């Protein structure tokens, strides 16, 4: 016997998803995806495409399309599934409707894919936790760091949808709720690995652990990295764990960025005693496992490696991996400038890529590092075209409006 659609459980006739909402979702989606092939193809006749998509959603015939699977190597090796552009519009539609409700439910110190709560905010918050707990470094405090093994690939879709359905029914009261639940169900239970397009070579997956790949996840488990819904639903999935840590275990200084979790406390033995409790809770309630090799219990004076930085008393540095990636990027653009005068697209890529590194590093104690790296490793050929500002956190083009390339 097949499970009835959520559309059948409503007491009153539902109202369909409006075309205006879909246009809003489209505008949000296109901001960062306009140059992709899928986005440009959709934009050629976007009004007609949105009308068709709206009709499919409201008559129940919408189904997610094929994703493109590929590997990225930096900052770390990851498997990415890029959904078709029309599916990304649907993802934005769902999150537009639920995000405000999620924000009321999430704890203040969960980060990632939340407005004003990115990487820098998470780092800043942990630094503040340490200063407060140690009374400005005048007494001992300890930091417990834990990580979930293969987090995205271990998310149980049935558990996730069950939690989400209960949450939506309790908190979302607009008449289009049945359509929203049906979209959530289709997005969560769709397996992009079953019918995807591989970009690159199969050999690119060599060296990627099985617990980091959707192709090797357990049946009924795993969300694709790369989708907006995956990021937000992953936050929602761990929300009950956040409340358990903060309110049941009483941890004042606790925070989480995706599945990187930290707790700060004066008592080392107390933090150590939490580990078996956390293991049991994660396995019983969420079907998740702590990564055995990513459990660290450190004194603050040793420095804490968190989200790409080392947090030490009164100073924060970037990790060596970031320095190495920045160095590699400089060498790549130097080789371009040595072969020929950079084209417009290459100059734009240089500005975007290098400025992203400088913009990341400027938040921390890296002025001397940035100045030294650029002086030693940036080719003078680029310095004929671009110049850094006084703070060395941004490049602009020299006489950009006068020159013709």
Image: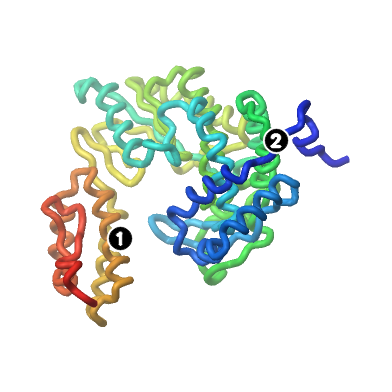
> Quick one: quadrant of the C terminus?
bottom left
Residue 311 higher or lower than 192, as above or below? above
The residue indicated by pointer 2 is 15
Residue occupying the far left of the picture? 390
Residue 169 higher or lower than 326, as above or below? above
Q: State left or right for residue 267 relative to residue 53.
A: left
Q: Position of residue 366 (x, y in %)?
A: 19, 48
**Visible in this render: residue 156?**
yes
Marks counted in the figure total 2
Q: Residues within 10 Å of mark 1 (few under 14, many from 20)?
A: few
**Visible in this render: residue 157?**
no
Q: Please identify the quarter of the rendering in which residue 306 is found.
A: top left
Residue 268 higher or lower than 119, as above or below? above
The residue at the point 39 percent across, 28 percent down is 263
- The disc placed on residue 395 is none
Per the image, label 1 sits on a secondary structure element best described as helix
Q: Position of residue 247 (x, y in %)?
A: 48, 18
Q: Position of residue 382 (x, y in %)?
A: 19, 71
Q: Which color scheme did the rendering employ for the protein? A: rainbow
| Tag 1 and tag 2, C-beta contact below 8 Å | no
| Foreground pick, 334 / 168 | 168
The residue indicated by pointer 1 is 352
């Amino acid at each position: 016997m097949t499970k009835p659609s959520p559309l059948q459980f409503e007491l009153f006739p539902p109202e369909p998803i409006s075309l205006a909402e879909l246009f809003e979702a489209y505008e949000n989606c296109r901001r960062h995806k306009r140059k992709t092939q899928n986005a440009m193809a959709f934009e050629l006749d976007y009004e007609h495409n949105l009308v068709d998509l709206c009709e499919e959603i409201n008559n129940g015939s919408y189904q997610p399309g094929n994703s493109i699977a590929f590997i990225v190597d930096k900052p770390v090796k990851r498997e990415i599934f890029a959904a078709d552009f029309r599916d990304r519009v649907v993802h934005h539609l769902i999150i537009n409707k639920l995000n405000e409700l999620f924000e009321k439910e999430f704890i203040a110190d969960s980060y990632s894919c939340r407005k004003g709560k990115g990487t820098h905010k998470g780092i800043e918050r942990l630094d503040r936790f340490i200063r407060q707990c140690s009374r400005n470094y005048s007494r001992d405090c300890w930091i417990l760091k834990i990580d979930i093994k293969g987090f995205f690939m271990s998310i149980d879709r049935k558990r996730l949808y069950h939690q989400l359905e209960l949450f939506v029914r309790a908190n979302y009261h607009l008449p289009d709720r049945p359509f929203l639940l049906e979209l959530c169900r289709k997005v969560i239970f769709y397996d992009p690995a079953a019918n995807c397009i591989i970009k690159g070579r199969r050999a690119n997956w060599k060296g990627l652990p099985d617990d980091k790949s959707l192709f090797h996840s357990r049946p009924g488990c795993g969300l694709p990295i790369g989708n907006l819904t995956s990021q937000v639903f992953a936050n929602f999935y761990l929300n009950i764990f956040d409340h358990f840590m903060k309110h049941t275990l009483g941890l004042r200084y606790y925070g989480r960025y995706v599945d990187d979790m930290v707790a700060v406390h004066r008592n080392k033995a107390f933090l150590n005693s939490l580990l078996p409790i956390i293991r049991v809770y994660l396995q019983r309630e969420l079907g998740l496992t702590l990564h055995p090799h990513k459990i660290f219990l450190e004194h603050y004076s040793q420095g804490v490696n968190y989200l790409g930085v080392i947090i030490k008393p009164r100073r924060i540095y970037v990790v060596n991996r970031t320095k190495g990636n920045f160095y590699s990027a400089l060498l790549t653009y130097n080789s371009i400038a040595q072969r020929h005068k950079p084209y417009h697209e290459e100059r734009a890529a240089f500005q975007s890529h290098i400025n992203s590194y400088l913009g990341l590093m400027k938040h921390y104690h890296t002025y001397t590092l940035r100045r030294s790296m650029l002086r030693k490793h940036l080719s003078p050929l680029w310095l004929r075209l671009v110049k850094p500002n006084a703070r060395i956190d941004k490049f602009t083009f020299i006489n950009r409006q006068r020159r013709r390339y």
